[in-house]
Amino acid sequence: MTADDSFGRLDDDDYPAYTMGRAAAMLGTTQGFLRALGEARLITPLRSDGGHRRYSRYQLRIAARARELVDQGTPIDAACRIIILEDQLEEAQRINAEYRRVAGESSAPSPSA
């Protein structure tokens, strides 16, 4: 990958741009916390060629939500489950909205010629 290719990925939420140390610093947490999220399978960081964990902005948002719940006293396993359920609910709501949109289009009266 060239430098030009890398610059094109800067806006990609899924691009693994952050090292574990940088991610932990950005979140104000420890590297151990990020490892625990990986062990709980909430986030799975990609690995660099050297085997180092790399995190995307999307993964950092998930980790920030987990930290928020843990800071409120929620055990980490429960926080991970809550986040998974929130994500599933959001996806179900998106699908339902799409079904309603499609159903509304198919039941709309056709314009007369």
Image (spheres, grey):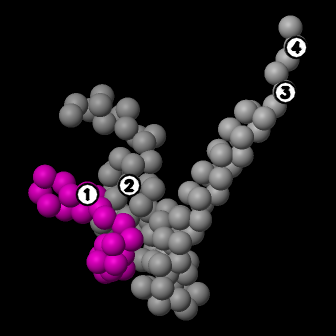
Left or right of 96 on screen, residue 32 = left
Which numbered disc flags the more N-terminal residue, 4 or 1?
1
Q: Are marks 2 and 1 in contact (CB under 8 Å)?
A: yes
Q: Secondary structure at mark 2?
A: loop
Name the residue rendered at 13%, 52% in the picture.
49
**In the image, residue 95 above or below residue 77:** above
Residue 53, given in percent of the width and then of the height, sits at 24, 63
Label 1 sits on what residue type? Answer: Leu
Mark 2–mark 4 Cα distance, whole angstroms, equals: 51 Å
**Tag 3: amino acid:** Pro
Quadrant hosting residue 92: bottom right
Q: Which residue is mark 3?
A: 109
Magenta-span inclusion, residue 87: no
Q: Indicate which disc, 2 or 3, sits on the residue closer to the N terminus.
A: 2
Question: Residue 38: within the magenta?
Answer: yes
Disc 4: which residue: 112
In the rendered view of the protein, which quadrant contains the C terminus? Answer: top right
Mark 1 or 3, nearer chain start: 1
Against 39, is 51 above or below? above
- SS assignment at label 4: loop
Question: Residue at the location (32% across, 52% down)?
Answer: 16
From mark 1 to mark 3, how far is it between C-alphas?
Answer: 50 Å
The magenta span reads 32-54
Q: Is residue 30 visible?
A: no
- Closer mark to the observer between disc 4 and disc 1: 4
Q: CA distance from mark 4 to mark 1?
A: 56 Å
Label located before the other in sequence (2 or 4): 2
Q: What residue does disc 2 label?
A: 56
Query: Which residue has dot 1 on it?
Result: 46
